Image (cartoon, rainbow, N blue to C red):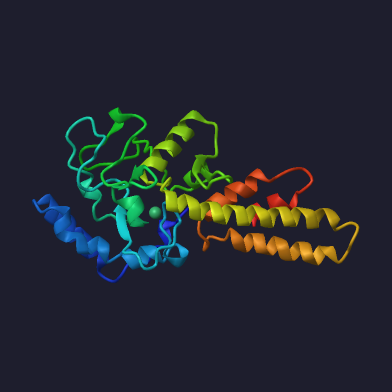
Amino acid sequence: MRNINLNLLVLPDNWLARADAAKAAVVAGDSPEDHADVWRDLKHNLADLFPDEKCWYCETRCPRDDNAVDHYRPKGRVHEAANPHNGYQWLAFDFRNFRYSCRYCNERRVNVKGDTAGGKADRFPLLDETKRVYNEGPCDEEQPVLLDPCDPTDWKLLGCKLENGKPCATSQDEIAKLRVEESIEIFHLHHEPTCKARHAEAVRFVQLVQEAKQLYLKIEAELAGQQRFKKKAGEILAAMDRSTEYSGEKHFLLRAERDTNHPWIQDLLEA
Ligand SMILES: [Zn+2]
């Protein structure tokens, strides 16, 4: 996961007026689904905010898959709500509530082979259910459990295990761990084929870092080594660029490689 800046979203001409009209129609009794074309028409604009049409939740590249516009706060009903909830219908046409998502993260499904299940659907747990908002109004008091790629810092809470590509928390903080564990299940981030792909990327990436470390330690003794090291450092930057799959997890793996002998790692993390 990486941070997505929704402020950079480009809206088509007249889209805001269409969204307002759809919202009014829903207040008058229509279902949000009756006006699904309004959010679907933003799909490509949303996809453009992250390279290669990657899913904002899992960073898997699915250019041929029929990716969807997910409503971060569900528009239909809310699975975890303590009282009957019709969904955050007033946010159904608010682009700030839209997330570009693959179908594995967005739709509930069971992976029989790997014995995992997940998919967001109508899930939206809160840290404190008593703060749940039921009617149109600000949601600032709600503390979502699900990691949000549009939050500037949430993405850094999610990492992966080098040994098997399974997602994991990067922090020992109890609330952060709870949020990551719930997000893994609800976004189906532990889906076996995704873990395999993430594992392969992670292993290749850490191998690059090890090679760079070896080159770095030889620089003093061998001046020509400086160029070889710089080239390798450039490869590391490219390998964890936002355009690559699982770049957030690779960022986490590089953070784990920091030590006093290798100050260059911090420079790359800040690059
Ligand atoms: Zn996904």
Question: Could you tell me residue 233's position as x and y percent?
Answer: 71, 60
- Extreme right residue here? 221
Point 55% across, 55% down: residue? 200
Name the residue nearer the viewer: 103 or 75: 103
Residue 1 seen in render = no
- Extreme front residue here? 113
Question: Could you tell me residue 7's position as x and y percent?
Answer: 41, 58
Q: In this view, does 22 lie above or below 144?
A: below
Residue 92 seen in render = yes
Question: Could you tell me residue 52's position as x and y percent?
Answer: 45, 67
Give the tally of numbered discs. 0
Point 43% across, 53% down: residue? 193
Point 10% across, 54% down: residue? 30
Q: Is residue 222 above or below residue 138?
A: below
Question: Could you tell me residue 99's position as x and y percent?
Answer: 35, 55
Q: Is residue 230 left or right of residue 79?
A: right
Image-quarter location of ligand 1: bottom left
Q: In this view, does 74 lie above or below 14?
A: above
Determine which quarter of the picture holds residue 115: top left
The quarter of the image holding the C terminus is bottom right
